[in-house]
Amino acid sequence: MLDLVLCVDDDPITLMLCKMVINRSDFAQELITAQNGEEALNYFDDLRLNNLGNEVKRYPQLIFLDLNMPVMGGWEFLDCFTKEDYRTYFKDCKVIVLSSTIDPDDINKAKTYPMVLDFLSKPISKEMLENLKETLL
């Protein structure tokens, strides 16, 4: 079981479904949510600031990330999150792109980000989580 998972999506129904499926599958002890990439980056910035330059001990091991969101979408988030200051503090954090798009260009682009483990289609399911458990644990 993962300790902490972050789900980033602007759709409240998707966030509710993520919470429900993750809680029922014993995939993670805790799930936190953000409604766009900017909120997610602010969360990670707060973690760094609260640790005053020390190693951040507890942060999400996995992010489920939507691509198409207002304010800051998934691609913008990934571009920021690959920068050295984030990767230094959160190097073990992995990303699963969870999107409704089936565009092969999006799937191929996701593969260019080193922290992206997979590109999965919405909605999240218990079977998806079971397969991910085998990969992550």
Image (tube, helix red, strand yellow):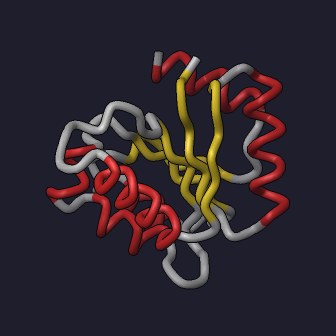
Residue 116, percent from left and from top:
38, 47
Q: Which residue is rendered at x = 82% and y = 47% of the image?
A: 17
Identify which residue, 119 or 78, lies in the foreground. 78
In the picture, measured across the screen, residue 73 lies left or right of residue 111, that is right
Q: Quadrant of the N terminus?
A: top right
Residue 70, above or below 81: below
Q: Which residue is rendered at x = 53% and y = 16% of the image?
A: 134
Residue 90, above or below 25: below
Residue 53, percent from left and from top:
17, 48
Tell me the quarter of the picture where residue 132 sits: top right
Residue 130, percent from left and from top:
66, 21
Q: Which residue is rendered at x = 22% and y = 37% of the image?
A: 55
Q: How many badges with numbers are in the image?
A: 0
Tell me the quarter of the picture where residue 89 sits: top left
Farthest residue in the bottom direction? Answer: 71
Residue 51, percent from left and from top:
28, 45
Identify which residue, 37 or 43, lies in the foreground. 43
In the picture, measured across the screen, residue 130 lies left or right of residue 94, that is right
Q: Which residue is rendered at x = 54% and y = 84% of the image?
A: 71
In the picture, measured across the screen, residue 15 lies left or right of residue 47, that is right
Tell me the quarter of the picture where residue 36 sits: bottom right
